[in-house]
Amino acid sequence: MGTGSSDFARQITVTLSLVVCIVGSMIGVGVFGGTPIAQAAGGALAADSTLLAPATPAFSIWSVVYAGLVAYTVWQWVPSQRANSRQRSLGWIVAVSMILNAAWILSVQAGWLFVSVLVILALLVTLVLAFLRYSQTRAASWVEAVVVDGTLGLYLGWTSVAVCANIAAALKASGFSGFGFQPEIWSVAVLVVVAIVGIALAIRGRGRLALAAAIAWGLVWITVGRSAAAPESFPTAIAAAVAAALVLGAAITVRARTVMAGVGAGAGAAARR
């Protein structure tokens, strides 16, 4: 298969994967005869199921992510993007992520919680791989920065939080007792890990704000959920709020330093002319 044919195959695959993803999401919200995710699997993923479950409004971020994936799919059909090196690097990965997204919804619909954990972990790995790839180069335009970097950043950031809630739900449904430790100890420990990962991603990605904002969004809604609704947990709420502040603060700080370094380098180059 020639390079041009391969590019066309990638574009078609991304588009078909988007269709599968959108149909899956429609099933996940109760359209096409499906059961809303919050009610599926015996309500294991409801906003009040575990200490790490975000409050219901948090899930509205999916609308933004799906809109971004639609925009990404349209963008990759722009003639200038067909043979673009970034598209060649990301297209197949994004397609896989959308298929995994639909597979996750269907696994939850079927009540297969541990299968859903495996699927969302695979989705997380896929999105991290995409992050590592698009972080290697700068977007060529503000449109690409929003449609590609912004969309995939939100996607990864939210998934990073969702995977914790998914694992917690599966463990609770299986009767996991926490080895005798209080639930708050586990929830705070997980949130510490999320904060560390979020800060690491902020550093590795040179302060990508969409990624940090999505992580912070999920964490803030965990704070709201554990403060205003059962199961209430003050330690979990505080830990989530602190983690959100640390992740967002790290991204802003790294971004500011990156911008200042660029300004300084530009000024130095001008002075040498």
Image (tube, grey):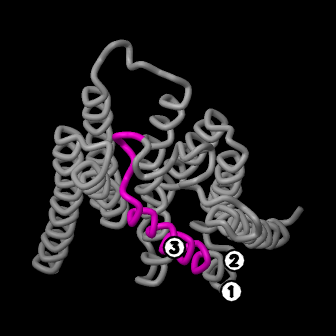
**Marks 2 and 3, how far apart at CA:** 26 Å
Image quadrant occupied by the C terminus: bottom left
The secondary structure type at the circle numbered 3 is helix
Question: Is 83 rendered above or below residue 206?
Answer: below
As drawn, the label of residue 63 is: 3
**Would residue 28 be found to the left or right of residue 139 on screen?**
right
- At x 61%, y 60%, the residue is 36
Q: Main secondary structure of the magenta part?
A: helix
- Judging by the rendered image, the residue that carries numbered circle 2 is 82
Give whichever of discs 2 and 3 has the lower sequence position: 3
Location of residue 261 in the rendering, given as x and y in whole percent from the top left corner: 16, 65
Q: Which residues are magenta?
A: 50-72
Q: Which residue is mark 1?
A: 79
Q: Nearer the viewer, residue 93 or 231?
A: 231
Element under label 1? helix
| Residue 32 at least partly seen | yes
Residue projecting furthest to the left: 271
Image location (x, y in percent) of residue 18: 70, 69
Mark 1 and mark 3 lie on one chain; the one further toward the N terminus is: 3
Q: Amino acid at mark 1?
A: Pro
Q: Tell me if residue 263 comes above or below residue 232 in the rendering.
A: below
Kindly check if marks 1 and 2 are in contact, taking CB atoms under 8 A apart as contact: yes
For image coordinates 71% across by 56% down, the residue present is 99
Q: Is residue 206 visible?
A: no
Labels 1, 3: front one? 3
Q: Going by the picture, which residue comes out furthest to the top? A: 179
Mark 1 surroundings within 10 Å by alpha-carbon count, few (fewer than 14), some (14 through 19), many (20 or more): few
Report the amino acid beneath label 3. Ser
Per the model, the C-alpha gap separating discs 1 and 2 is: 5 Å
Q: Residue 170 magenta-drawn?
A: no
Q: State the separation of the CA atoms marked 1 and 3.
A: 27 Å
